Image (spheres, rainbow, N blue to C red):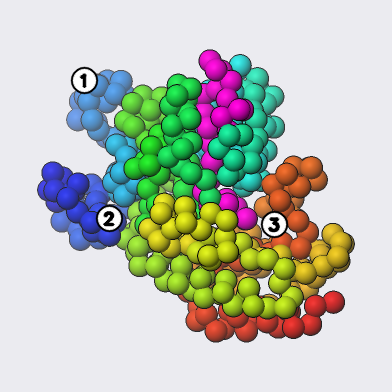
């Protein structure tokens, strides 16, 4: 492969062709390197490679061809200089914060992000003196007001959010961050680079749960951070070498292969999700549908501009109810009535998944944190898979027709 040609390629081509050169054996499909260490040609080369003065693979805790191939492909798709893979999406965020923050630093974060992200930032890093403020996802003025000059190091947003699909203005937040000498971090899990490239809109770092759409078939757990070479190699890689927040080579290979079909999968996911969202809006037992592809979504125009004109594969809806207890009972009834949808909090699979966020993905949050994030007891999240849309609709209709 001619690396100089890569910037001229369409993202779909990059997803198939970017990686490492073939080995001496000329394999067409990339090999997986299941080895813990690598033999060095001589002592001087070993010393240079361990010191980072010479390229070469050393030890799979921080360097392996399978990981590097996946990282290069993902970075090229996101439009960043480099990427680093981790054992999970939360591992990616952990590595990023360990590498960039210290006691006394401050983070501004959307209050609508994934529950475990809130727990990590406010809870785990709060114990070590990293301060945080949580603001409404779509209120740029609130983000600006929360910034502490000289202390704020990161602005963190996921867009769309999990599970209410709120969309932030990436370019506006990037401007705020840079004016404050801070970095904007965007969780691009829901859209993936097939729909959205935050770095083009000014973001500095992109975080991924490769477990989701990058793999795309629910096979492995993985994560990654994409960004500049200075940050990835200069600050995060040394931290990874010390902490071992490392993705296994086999899982890296699985994600690497999954990236090849990301574009066509996301097109199909999005088409089915939009069809389901339109259908849900017409159901009498549904109080509200949250999906950026709908014209009723508050940030519909912004989402279409940032997400290649597509709404993504994840939607949520609230069942009609007159109190939290009844709302929870009705949501559970709809979920338990399904026969096709898989009841699991994971997403990004070829199979449609359904979950109750208030008791699963956001179940560890305090009630006031859930309320701030808008996670009600009647909310149901659907990650639309690749089944026929009519079958998904029929599966949900079973419960919606006979709400208790």
First in sequence: mark 3 or mark 2?
2
Going from N to C along the chain, the mark reached first, 1 or 2, is 2
Judging by the rendered image, the residue that carries numbered circle 1 is 44
Front residue (pair 388, 55): 388
Tell me the magenta residue range.
Answer: 143-166
CA gap, disc 3 and disc 2 = 33 Å
Residue labelled with disc 3: 357
Q: Nearer the viewer, mark 1 or mark 2?
A: 2
User: Can residue 87 be seen in the rendering of this structure?
Assistant: no
How many residues crowd mark 2 within 10 Å: few (<14), some (14–19), many (20+)? some
Tag nearer the camera, 1 or 3: 3
Q: Nearer the viewer, residue 225 or 10?
A: 10
Can you say whether 192 is above or below 185 in the image? below
Mark with earlier residue (1, 3):
1
* In the depicted structure, whether residue 377 falls above or below residue 386: above
Q: Secondary structure at mark 2?
A: helix
Rendered position, 330 above or below 373: below
> Which residue is found at the position 52% from the left and 75% from the top?
275
Task: Identify the residue at image location x=43%, y=63%.
Answer: 310
Please report contact status of discs 1 and 2: CB closer than 8 Å, yes or no. Answer: no
Q: Position of residue 286 (x, y in %)?
A: 71, 72
Numbered badge on residue 11: 2
Horizontal side, residue 241 vs residue 98: left or right: left
Judge left or right: residue 233 versus residue 394: left
Instruction: Give the Cα separation between the discs numbered 1 and 2.
Output: 40 Å
Q: Position of residue 8 (x, y in %)?
A: 17, 50
Asked if one can make out residue 290 in the rendered structure from this viewpoint, the answer is yes
């Amino acid at each position: 492969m001619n690396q100089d040609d890569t910037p001229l390629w369409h993202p779909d081509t990059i997803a198939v062709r970017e990686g490492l050169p073939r080995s001496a054996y000329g394999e067409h499909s990339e090999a997986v390197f299941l080895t813990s260490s690598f033999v060095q040609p001589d002592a001087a080369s070993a010393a240079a490679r361990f010191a980072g003065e010479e390229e070469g693979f050393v030890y799979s805790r921080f360097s392996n061809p399978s990981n590097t191939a996946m990282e290069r492909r993902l970075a090229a798709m996101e439009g960043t200089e480099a990427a680093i893979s981790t054992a999970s999406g939360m591992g990616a965020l952990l590595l990023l914060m360990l590498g960039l923050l210290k006691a006394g630093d401050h983070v501004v974060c959307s209050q609508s992000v994934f529950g475990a992200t809130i727990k990590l930032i406010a809870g785990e890093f709060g114990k070590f003196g990293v301060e945080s403020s949580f603001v409404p996802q779509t209120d740029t003025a609130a983000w600006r007001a929360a910034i502490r000059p000289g202390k704020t190091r990161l602005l963190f947003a996921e867009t769309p959010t999990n599970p209410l699909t709120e969309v932030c203005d990436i370019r506006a937040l990037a401007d705020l961050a840079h004016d404050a000498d801070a970095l904007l971090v965007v969780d691009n899990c829901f859209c993936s680079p097939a729909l959205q490239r935050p770095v083009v809109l000014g973001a500095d770092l992109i975080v991924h749960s490769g477990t989701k759409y990058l793999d795309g078939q629910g096979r492995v757990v993985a994560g990654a951070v994409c960004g500049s070479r200075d940050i990835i190699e200069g600050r995060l890689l040394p931290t990874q070498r010390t902490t071992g927040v490392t993705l296994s080579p086999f899982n890296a290979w699985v994600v690497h292969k999954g990236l090849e079909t990301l574009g066509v999968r996301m097109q199909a996911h999005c088409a089915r999700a939009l069809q389901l969202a339109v259908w849900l809006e017409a159901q009498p037992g549904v109080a509200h549908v949250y999906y950026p592809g709908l014209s009723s979504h508050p940030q519909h125009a912004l989402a279409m501009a940032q997400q290649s004109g597509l709404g993504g594969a994840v939607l949520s809806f609230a069942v009609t109810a007159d109190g939290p207890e009844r709302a929870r009972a009705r949501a559970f009834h709809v979920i338990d009535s399904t026969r096709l949808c898989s009841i699991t909090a994971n997403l990004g699979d070829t199979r449609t998944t359904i979950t109750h966020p208030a008791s699963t993905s956001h179940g560890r949050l305090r009630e006031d944190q859930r309320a701030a994030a808008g996670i009600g007891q009647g909310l149901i999240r659907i990650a639309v898979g690749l089944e026929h849309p009519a079958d998904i609709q029929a599966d949900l209709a079973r419960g919606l027709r006979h709400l208790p």
